[in-house]
């Protein structure tokens, strides 16, 4: 690949990374719990991109392009998962409102202990169950390759995932800092409700678009 093609690809990845999507909203959702969960969600999503890069490099993603049923099934699964995340966040918020101060503090401590792993898994699964990522790689990566091989395709996928990871980590840090500055309970409650509702709406839209 020539340097001009590589720079063009990097520029495209930067532009796409700043476009809000399900992964960005997921990172924002976990930023409510602090920077570490938000960064974990960002890293999980980036690794999900690597998974898709491997799948595309192996040629498996072509099956999704040719099979409408497989594509719809994956979209429905991904949509349901996003709805699940949104509903779980809303239920957790309601439980927190109903709990007493001591119980809420203990629950918060337990949640923080598991939030990094949960955030990483959520980011990974959200990306893996989004077939648009695979189809993007399948359609775009060959355009920037003079020779389509497993190694070359995987390299471009790794570049795209790295750029996306950097953007989402910066988003996680910025959002976490903003949340730290907005510790008023009413504001935090609204932000948590809004982020959970957005995730659920994105999931419903993703699943509905499969039809």
Image (cartoon, rainbow, N blue to C red):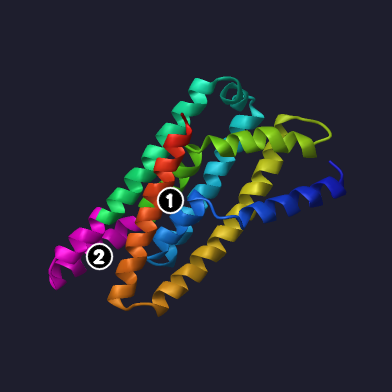
Residue at 40% across / 51% down in the picture?
A: 199
Mark 2 element type: helix
Q: CA distance from mark 2 to mark 1?
A: 18 Å
Q: Which mark is residue 44?
A: none
Q: In which quarter of the view is residue 138 placed?
A: top right
Q: Residue 98 magenta-drawn?
A: yes
Q: Is residue 4 left or right of residue 158?
A: right
Q: Counting other residues with Cα less than 10 Å from the Cα at mark 2, is it few (<14), some (14-19), or many (20 or more)?
A: some
- In this picture, is 98 found above or below 142? below
Residue count near mark 1 (Cα–Cα under 10 Å), binned few <14, some 14–19, many ≥20: many
Q: How many marks?
A: 2
User: Quadrant where the N terminus lies?
Assistant: top right
User: Which residues are drawn in magenta?
Assistant: 91-115
Mark 1 secondary-structure assignment: helix
Q: Which mark is residue 120?
A: 1
Q: Position of residue 173 (x, y in %)?
A: 50, 68
Given residues 36 and 180, the one toward you in this image is: 180
Q: Considering only vertical position in the picture, is 101 above or below 70?
A: below
- Residue 95: x, y in percent? 18, 59
Question: Residue 206, percent across and down?
Answer: 46, 39
Residue named by callout 2: 108
Q: Is residue 175 above or below residue 143?
A: below
């Amino acid at each position: 690949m020539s340097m001009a093609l590589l720079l063009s690809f990097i520029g495209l990845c930067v532009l796409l990374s700043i476009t809000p999507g399900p992964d960005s909203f997921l990172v924002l959702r976990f930023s409510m719990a602090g920077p570490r969960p938000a960064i974990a969600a960002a890293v999980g999503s980036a690794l999900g991109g690597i998974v898709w890069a491997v799948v595309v490099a192996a040629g498996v993603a072509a099956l999704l392009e040719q099979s409408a049923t497989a594509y719809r099934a994956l979209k429905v699964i991904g949509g349901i998962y996003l709805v699940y995340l949104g509903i779980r966040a809303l239920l957790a918020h309601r439980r927190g409102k109903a709990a007493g101060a001591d119980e809420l503090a203990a629950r918060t401590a337990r949640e923080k202990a598991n939030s990094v792993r949960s955030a990483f898994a959520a980011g990974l699964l959200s990306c893996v169950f989004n077939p648009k990522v695979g189809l993007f790689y399948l359609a775009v990566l060959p355009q920037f390759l003079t020779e389509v091989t497993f190694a070359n395709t995987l390299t471009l996928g790794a570049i795209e995932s790295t750029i996306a990871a950097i953007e989402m980590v910066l988003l996680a840090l910025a959002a976490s800092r903003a949340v730290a500055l907005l510790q008023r309970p009413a504001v935090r409650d609204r932000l948590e409700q809004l982020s959970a509702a957005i995730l659920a709406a994105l999931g419903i839209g993703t699943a509905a678009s499969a039809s």
